[in-house]
Image (cartoon, coloured by chain):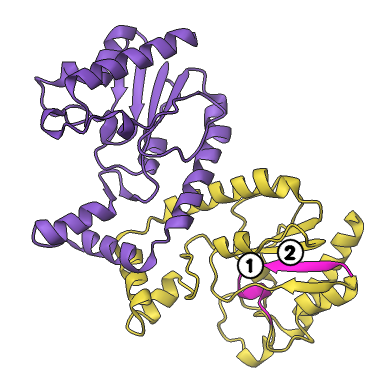
Chain colours: A purple, B yellow
Amino acid sequence: MKTINFCGDSFCQKESDINNRSLSWTTLLADKLNVSILGWGGPGAAHEHVFRSYDEEADYTVFCWTDTNRLYVNPDYSAIMGHLHHLIHQLGGLHNNIQKAAYAYYKYLHNIPIAKQRYMRELYWFDHAILSNYRGVAIHLPCFGIPYVFTHGINIDTPLNDMRSKDVKNELNNHFTEQENAMLADKLYNIIKQHM
Amino acid sequence: MQTINFCGDSFCRIAKNPDVAWTTLLASKLNVNIIGYGKSGAAHEHAIKTFDEKADYTVFCWTEPHRLYHVKYPLSIVSAENDQHKHRIYGAANVYYKYLHNMDLAIERYNRDLYWFDSIVLSKYKGLAIHIPCFTTIYKFTNHININTPINKLRDNPGKMNVPKTLEIANHMTKQQNAMLADKLYNIIKERS
């Protein structure tokens, strides 16, 4: 059976509610293509997680390229500035040394233009040194903005965040409503079929 | 008059004794103007940022991959630990290194940065560039000239132990080492010119 790999952040995460899993665009797309899913995105993950979860053996790979300011710490945790602020102001504070160090990092060391530049450079490297050798079909979905246009693979122009109605109450964990999930799966299926 | 640009860290910074520094000696031998020097404790980002495509010659001193780029402060594992109580920037860097820094990932990201710089920027450079690793060779450039021996290994004692500071009078090297490096680079440039 052929395989598909989803590399990215929460936009392509595995639905934690098992009752909703069949409604998510990842599952719907896999069903339409009749392929098995090798991996999902990680909630809150930095782009480094995408590089690390890429599998050249997958027949299809869907990348969800997240925002440029996340800090990869380890396979289970990437720091996000907004989340740290939320912890401080809404949830009573930072709970461990990693979170405290990440907060200090964003406050005193993080350089937004440099982070953006390095992100772009790293995607260039991934595009030319890694994806140039990929034999499967790759689709690149930007999550929030378009930081880089890939030479290898299919670029989707509309960021995932712009496809949302932001009807938060009716969203799955991947930030889309049931209808938006179905539309995205259809859209990607048609694009893949056109390119085959 | 032609120009030379030095992009890197303290190994190519403006020296306290410029007359004996390899940077000055090399510029003098080539009969060119120096348009830029390295910066003490700088990260590799500084080398990338100070590159000037208009320079006729560029000498890169590629530093170690664990330094953090900061406009004002030289941030390394050592400086962060030593100066953590002197300024909050160093304090933040110290906890960064303690809890967040990933040594292997820093090397990978350094390689990716240099891959991009090599492929996108240096491939279009019309001058002559020389790449000198400061401590170890991490990335081998496709464009221009790679020097195999790290500059730190030219020193009598790279660990700075048992060498009187007074002997290392410019860019961490003795007068003789500075002269030798300038000669070596001059000969390499002349062979390629």
Placement of A35 over or under A100, stated as above or below = above
**Residue B132 or residue A142, whichever sits in front:** A142
Residue that mark 1 sits on: B8
Horizontal side of A165 relative to B33 (left or right) equals left
Residue in the picture at 31% in, 22% down: A38
**Disc sitting over residue B59 in the figure:** 2
Horizontal side of B100 relative to A120 (left or right) equals left
Horizontal side of A50 relative to B118 (left or right) equals left
**Disc sitting over residue B66 in the figure:** none
The percent position of residue A77, horizontal first and vertical second, equals 26, 47
Q: Say which quarter of the image contains residue A34.
A: top left
Placement of A195 over or under A171, stated as above or below = above
- As measured in the structure, the alpha-carbon distance from the residue carrying label 2 to the one carrying label 1 is 8 Å
Residue in the picture at 64% in, 70% down: B152
Residue in the picture at 30% in, 13% down: A30
**Residue A121 or residue B160, whichever sits in front:** A121
Placement of A69 over or under A157, stated as above or below = below
**Residue A120 or residue B148, whichever sits in front:** A120
